[in-house]
């Protein structure tokens, strides 16, 4: 159907061109036909010539139109809307500039230059609206937040710092799974934002041929389903993307800047990048270390010695939260559950280490 429409349009175009310009060609050729005969003949000849050309070009035109149609249909509504608004603004500016150029009595400036100006400003306007849509959407979101700052009941102003910011989850913290438990305890306020590019990365991991990666990806998808269906938190999917940025971590940082949100992660490198670019970040590992029970020298505890340590006669045990305990003179107690006395606590970049001695040896001393 589209092919027939294109052919009909080309034939009508050829007939129109022939009707308008073929009589002038007949006059040059000194053909003494009546004017209406020249016009009709020109229309027929023009339609016939372009009709024959359609057999070579119509398929290319149809393919191009279908490509444009598919691109427009697949593009998100926000991208089309802001791209069209940018195009309109660009054309309006081009119209105003071209009006000024009409007063210049130079044919190139007044007739040819406006064509290039119209094309360039229209193109730039579309690109600005299309690629900066996230910033424009953020402007509207900020206006909505300002309206919420007015208390509906008392009319008193609400401190903007009290309004929870959006929490943007990265892939690692979703796969980790502890984010679901944190949300269930209501320690994480505000809307949970899942970017679409993070979902794509999770799906790619879940479809991996590597068994370990596949299980991690599926676990992440299960965590997302739990967040959305079973937990008392508001979860939103961010459909936008940053086509000029390829790395997912870089996209997360840029999205946090656009939304004025907070990145939630357990990735050490992403944590450092966010801090360097002045983006707020919440690290699940930092939270886990902060809530570990405080242990002071002299306290007593019961642990199971699992293996020997690096130094001679050392034994190694672990608390329920994973904290490693180095037991001096504990090699002889491997496989046994004993009471130990804490001698010192060492905080390292990898976590916390507790040094202790068996209580029985302490009494002997």
Image (cartoon, rainbow, N blue to C red):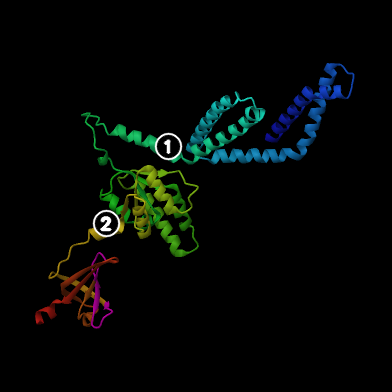
Whether residue 356 appears in this view of the structure is: yes
> Is 323 inside the magenta-drawn segment?
yes
Query: Which secondary structure lies at badge 1?
Result: helix
- Write down the region rendered in magenta: 307-324
Instruction: Identify the mark nearer the N-term, 2 or 1.
Output: 1
Residue at 57 percent of width and 41 percent of height = 71
Look at the magenta stretch and give its main secondary structure: loop
Q: CA distance from mark 2 to mark 1?
A: 34 Å
At 64% from the left and 37% from the top, the residue drawn is: 65
Residue 353 drawn in magenta: no
What residue would you read off at disc 2?
287
Quadrant placement of the C terminus: bottom left
Residue 171 screen position, x and y as percent: 40, 55
Q: Is residue 359 above or below residue 201?
A: below
Q: Secondary structure at mark 2?
A: helix
Residue 243: which numbered mark, if any? none
Q: Quadrant of residue 14?
A: top right
């Amino acid at each position: 159907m589209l092919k027939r429409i294109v052919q009909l349009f080309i034939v009508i175009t050829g007939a129109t061109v022939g009707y308008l310009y073929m009589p002038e060609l007949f006059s040059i050729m000194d053909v003494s036909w009546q004017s209406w005969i020249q016009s009709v003949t020109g229309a027929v000849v023009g339609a016939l010539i372009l009709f024959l050309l359609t057999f070579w070009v119509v398929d290319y035109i149809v393919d191009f139109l279908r490509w444009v149609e598919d691109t427009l249909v697949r593009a998100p509504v926000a991208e089309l809307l802001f791209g069209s608004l940018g195009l309109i603004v660009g054309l309006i500016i081009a119209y105003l500039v071209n009006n000024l150029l009409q007063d210049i009595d130079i044919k190139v400036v007044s007739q040819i230059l406006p064509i290039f100006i119209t094309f360039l400003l229209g193109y730039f306007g579309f690109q600005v609206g299309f690629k900066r849509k996230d910033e424009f959407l953020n402007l509207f979101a900020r206006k909505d937040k300002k309206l919420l700052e007015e208390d509906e009941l008392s009319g008193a102003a609400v401190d903007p710092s009290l309004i929870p910011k959006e929490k943007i989850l990265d892939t690692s913290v979703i796969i980790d799974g502890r984010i679901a438990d944190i949300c269930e305890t209501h320690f994480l306020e505000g809307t949970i934002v899942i970017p679409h590019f993070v979902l794509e990365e999770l799906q790619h991991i879940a479809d991996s041929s590597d068994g370990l990666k596949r299980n991690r990806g599926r676990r992440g998808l299960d965590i997302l389903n739990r967040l959305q269906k079973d937990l008392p938190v508001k979860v939103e999917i961010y459909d936008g993307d940053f086509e000029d940025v390829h790395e997912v971590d870089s996209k997360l940082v840029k999205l946090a800047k656009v939304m004025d949100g907070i990145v939630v992660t357990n990735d050490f490198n992403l944590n450092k990048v966010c801090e360097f670019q002045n983006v707020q970040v919440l690290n699940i590992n930092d939270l886990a270390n902060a809530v570990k029970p405080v242990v002071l020298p002299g306290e007593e505890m019961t642990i199971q010695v699992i293996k020997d340590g690096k130094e001679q006669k050392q034994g190694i045990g672990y608390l329920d939260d994973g904290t490693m305990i180095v037991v001096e003179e504990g090699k002889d107690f491997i496989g046994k559950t004993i009471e130990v006395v804490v001698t010192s606590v060492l905080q390292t970049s990898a976590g916390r280490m507790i040094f202790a001695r068996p209580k029985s040896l302490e009494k002997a001393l």
